[in-house]
Each structure stands twice: as C-alpha cells, then as structure tokens.
Image: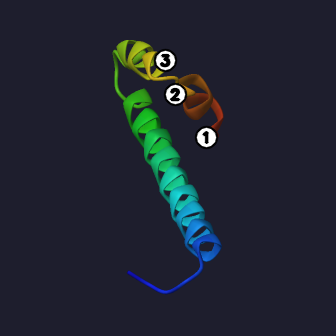
Amino acid sequence: MTCEPVGVRNQQMEREIATLKAERDEARLEVCQLLAQFPGAGASEGYAEERGWKYLNARNDGKS
C-alpha cells in the first residue's frame, strides 16, 4: 500500500481505466475490420450489434 492521498490514487486509476477502455475499443474496431474482409461477414454484423459495437462504421470508414 502506498502513502499517496486518496485523490491521487483515484486519478491514477481513472487514467488506467481510460487507457484500458481505449485499448478495448481499438481491439473491437480491429476485429470488426478483420471480419469485414471475409465473405459471409454479414453474420458478424449481428455479433457486433449484439454487443453494441459500431460494426458498420468500422467497416465503412475505419472509425468507431
């Protein structure tokens, strides 16, 4: 355990959480882009949509 004030630890955790969320979103985008390259990827649209991923945007313009 560190002797840092609670506010400092909270800020550190918030930054770590933001970093992890950004990495997660980047990985989701990459998966959707990869799936879009294969025939029959229409089924993967449903998979992505069930999870709330922005599959169509990832496939069409490379943005999440």
Residue drawn 42% across the image and 13% down it: 46
Residue carrying label 2: 53
- Asked if the residues shown at circle 3 and circle 2 are in contact, with their CB atoms under 8 angstroms apart, the answer is yes
Among numbered discs 1 and 2, the one appearing first in the sequence: 2
User: What amino acid type should be assigned to the residue bearing mark 3?
Assistant: Glu
Among numbered discs 3 and 1, the one appearing first in the sequence: 3
Q: Secondary structure at mark 2?
A: loop
- Asked if the residues shown at circle 3 and circle 1 are in contact, with their CB atoms under 8 angstroms apart, the answer is no
Which quadrant of the figure contains the C terminus? top right
In 3D space, how far apart are the residues under numbered discs 3 and 1 (Cα atoms)? 16 Å
Residue carrying label 1: 62
Which quadrant of the figure contains the N terminus? bottom left
Residue drawn 45% across the image and 40% down it: 28
User: What amino acid type should be assigned to the residue bearing mark 2?
Assistant: Trp
Q: Secondary structure at mark 3?
A: helix
Residue carrying label 3: 49
